[in-house]
Image (cartoon, rainbow, N blue to C red):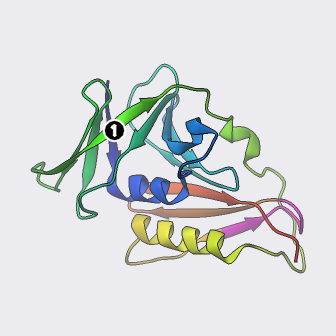
Amino acid sequence: MKLKIKRGTLLALLEFQAKNDVRYYLNGIAFMAGGKVAATDGHRLALGEHDNKVKETVIVKLHKLPTKNFDHVIIDTKAGTVELYSVHDLKIGITMCELVEGRYPDVERVLPKNFEACDEVGFNVEYLNSIAKAAKYISPKFCGIKLKLQGATGSAMAEVSYAGESMKFVVMPMRL
């Protein structure tokens, strides 16, 4: 199966994917039916969109990208390769990938649904920093986010959209 994904979406997902987690299925990016793509480490979630036709969730773990200067990638799950392409569809790099067997968590379930105003919320600064990095991948010229809070103890959702690409990021608060 070949999966295509845009640069900004992929780089943002890689910021949020787990690294060497015992829950091995979180160490990959999940391409879900319905055009959603997600990555999470259990505390943070990135949710974007893809244009591939998949019937069931496919989890792919990418090896290190040779460069961040590309337009899109094509992931070949059968060959285990990730090909990086420029704006003019010139192949500019290649790396390896592997399929991850497992059941990815239901990410729709953790998306905040009821938003409410609150006086203060505590967040891990590293989680907010990862949202800032991901937002720059999606919108390098106009780096802004819309932050929606679910009260002082609920998760927060940040939304970024620019030039046809949009993503949602969910972070869990911390007690201070």
Look at 53% across and 52% down and name the residue there. 19
**Where residue 61 sits: x, y (%)?**
43, 40
Q: Residue drawn at (75%, 39%), measured in percent from left and top?
A: 109
Quadrant of residue 114 in the image?
bottom right
Residue occupying image coordinates x 40% and y 26%: 53
Q: Is residue 148 magenta?
A: yes
Tell me where residue 68 appears, x and y as whole percent.
28, 63
Spot occupied by residue 77 in the image (x, y as percentages of width and height):
32, 28
Identify the amino acid type marked 1.
Cys
Q: Which residue range is magenta in the image?
A: 147-154
Please give left or right for residue 114 compared with residue 79 in the image: right
Q: For this rendering, which residue is in front, 58 or 64?
A: 64
Magenta part, dominant SS = loop
> Is residue 164 in view?
no
Residue 150 seen in the current view: yes
Q: Is residue 133 above or below residue 115?
A: below
Please identify the quarter of the rendering in which residue 16 is found: bottom right
- Residue 14 vs residue 63: left or right? right
Q: In this rendering, would 61 be left or right of 20?
A: left
Q: Quadrant of the N terminus?
A: top left
Taking 171 as reference, is 75 left or right? left
Residue named by callout 1: 97
Q: Tell me where residue 154 sits by quadrant.
A: bottom right
Look at the numbered disc 1 and give the secondary structure of its residue.
strand
Disc 1 packing (10 Å; few <14; some 14–19; many ≥20): many
The quadrant of the image that shows the C terminus is bottom right
Residue at image position (54%, 74%) is 132
Q: Nearer the viewer, residue 46 or 20?
A: 20
Figure disc tally:
1
Seen from the viewer's position, the closer of residues 58 and 114 is 58
Can you give x and y, in whole percent of width and height, for residue 102 in the image?
A: 58, 26
